[in-house]
Amino acid sequence: MKIPFVDLKAQYATLKDEVAEAIRGVLESTQFIGGEALASFERDFAAYCRVPYARGVASGTDAIHLALRALGVGHGDEVITTAHTFIATAAAIVATGAQPVFVDIDPDTQTIDPRLIERALTSRTKAIVAVHLFGQPADMGPIKDIARRRGLFVIEDAAQAHGAEYQGIRTGALGDIACFSFYPGKNLGAYGDGGAVTTNNAAIAERIERLRDHGRTTHYNHAEVGFNSRLDALQAAVLQVKLRRLDEWNDHRRRAAEWYTAELRHSGIKTPFVRTGSTHVYHLYVIIANERDAIRKRLDEVGVASGIHYPLPLHLQPAFAYLGYKQGDLPCCEAMAARSLSLPMFPELTRDQVRRVAATVLAVVGRERHHELQREPVAMDAGGGKV
């Protein structure tokens, strides 16, 4: 039996009747843009994130773009973020006219290293985009301390961390504004593109609401030039059904992660590190191994899907060559790109599936290390005997 990287069919089978009913309600209402389905989801998602305001938008990328716009980030500004993330994080910065400034990561958590942020600050720095990577929040305490001292905004890129917590505070409530993606494979995924912005600030929420809808204040009155970035009602209805199960699904992800970690404990492979005081929701289960490519090849041969997040850090992407970064500038990001491997992770993952994946990984690691020992030169004594 093949093991998929994400099994959306298994998830759909558990809630298809609820989803069908929710979609039917939208179809019968004919309120496809805006309407009660969107308003209801926004209320529920805000409550879930423990903030007063949530505004649905067209995608996670748009969520970051509009968040930056709402905070006044634009031409001439610099925004600090990590190079170990999907390109959307930095592309949204560029879309405002600002310039991304990449900072290296903590090698344990793979999130942005707060100790390196201060030295990257300039008079042009306007904000910090902290990426909650793979399901674990960035180290928000020191990041927010830096921001307070320097008068900077903090934006959470929470696209991979729905329901994660940092020191008892849920993602979505940790910065000035937070951005979520509802891409289908996320912990909370729609049946198409979608995203949301959350905040504790009423003025920011109002600006997001305006920017996502052509800058309008009334039907034909536009206070500013905005965008068409609305979360449609059908997606909102699907998301509201799924939101009711998000905590349960996250618990199942943590259980699967515990199984993986137990199976790989004595292998020499680096398994995910969870920062004290943080709650990881394992959007991805990422291991670090020198034998990464051999492991992935063997997994593919036996029908197990895997992924690499991310094989080329943003500072080395051709799209950002104009920024002038070079190989060696962010060594931890580059090391992770060369050695990280994402194993199958979804709430319906079984213990037997985890054992099969882990056994394949362990077999490759054992074989590769045996070959390495055979290739090592053997020291000889003066008489020709082995030392």
Image (cartoon, grey):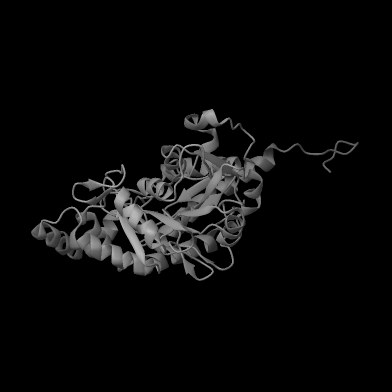
* Residue 377 pos. (x, y %): 75, 36
- What residue sits 30% from the left and 55% below the top? 56
* Residue 337 pos. (x, y %): 55, 41
The picture quadrant where one finds residue 29 is bottom left
The C terminus is located in which quarter? top right
Query: Residue most toward the bottom?
Result: 168
Query: Residue most toward the right?
Result: 382
- What residue sits 56% from the left and 68% below the top? 277
From where the camera sits, is residue 305 visible?
no
**In the image, 224: left or right of 127?**
left
Q: Is residue 345 above or below residue 245?
A: above
- In-front residue for pair 195/222: 222
* Residue 279 pos. (x, y %): 50, 66
- In-front residue for pair 338/69: 69
**How many marks are shown on the rendered structure?**
0
* Residue 142 pos. (x, y %): 61, 59
**In the image, 217: left or right of 49?**
left
From where the camera sits, is residue 142 visible?
yes
- In-front residue for pair 336/178: 178
- What residue sits 58% from the left and 58% below the top? 148
**In the image, 294: left or right of 198?**
right
- What residue sits 54% from the left and 33% below the top? 316
Q: Is residue 296 above or below residue 38?
A: above
**In the image, 371: left or right of 233?**
right
